[in-house]
Image: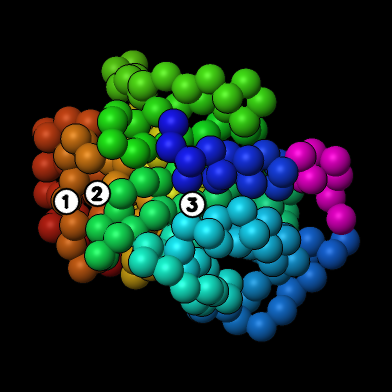
Amino acid sequence: MTPFVQAVIGAAAEIYGRLQSGWLEEYGRHFDVGAGGDRTAGIDRMAESVYVEALGSFGAVDSEESGIIGSGAATIVLDPIDGSDNALSGLPYFGSSIALERDGRVEEAVVVNLANGDMFYRSEGPLMRGTIREREFVPVRRREAATVGVFEKAYAYPALAERLLRKGMKFRSPGAVALSLAYAHDLQFVIFAGPRRRYDFAAALWMCEGLERIETDRLLIVAKEERTASDLHDLLLQTKD
């Protein structure tokens, strides 16, 4: 485990501990629109401050909330809270996405589920999975028995969602795309509809190397099997959302 990954884990553990201690009113306060285009909440600011303090020595932090913070040869692409609305609403599916880039290429990445403590990281070797509490990590293996996929922002493509249901392809739409992509090796597929921001995708999409991937200007499709990805793409082409 590299010093960068260790630093991310330490910061994530601090944030996780704060949230486990109870919800504070200040987490729900809203501020101006951040660099990523969404309004910043208090929970975003809290998490950002912890990560910036822990990771600032590794390079400039490009945060979804504040934009560029600091300087350095490397860039840390940070989404402090992926799924902020879930966190604000008490829905236990939200986390953080952190990628270390050099010369525009991701070299290390961590995605953490701050609701249940699941963590994923990838450096030079395979994608690893563990938990904040135990901090014992093992290589991720595909879950072949999966029966559902994830369709993030399915509400933006109701006709495609209906076609999936008619084909018997079950899906959920939990609302935190970095987390959903981190779990892609477990799921049948992950679909994302809408514009793609680097803060949401830099870390998690790099973790999907080895999976089937189709990108269009309308959708991103990630699946374990080529046939599944192809079938989903065919359904997209037949849909007029």
Q: CA distance from mark 3 to mark 2?
A: 19 Å
Q: Residue at x 88, y 61 (%)?
A: 25
Q: CA distance from mark 2 to mark 1?
A: 5 Å
Residue type indicated by callout 1: Ile
Q: Residues within 10 Å of mark 1 (few under 14, many from 20)?
A: some
Location of residue 129 (image quadrant): top left
Q: Residue at x 79, y 70 (%)?
A: 29
Q: Residue at x 36, y 46 (%)?
A: 108
Whether residue 162 appears in magenta in the rendering, the answer is no
Q: Nearer the viewer, mark 3 or mark 1?
A: 3
| Left or right: 96 as drawn, with respect to 172 | right
Q: Foreground: 107 or 171? A: 107
Residues in magenta, as a range:
17-24
| Left or right: 30 as drawn, with respect to 127 | right
**What residue sits right under mark 3 in the picture?**
97
**What residue sits right under mark 2 in the picture?**
221
Secondary element type, mark 1: strand
**What residue sits right under mark 1 in the picture?**
214
Q: Nearer the viewer, mark 3 or mark 2?
A: 3
> Where is residue 104 drawn, in percent x and y?
26, 65
Where 5 falls versus 60 (above or below)? above
Name which of mark 3 and mark 1 comes first in the sequence.
3
> Where is residue 107 drawn, in percent x and y?
31, 49
Where 196 falls versus 164 (above or below)? below
Farthest bottom residue in view? 32
Residue type indicated by callout 2: Ile
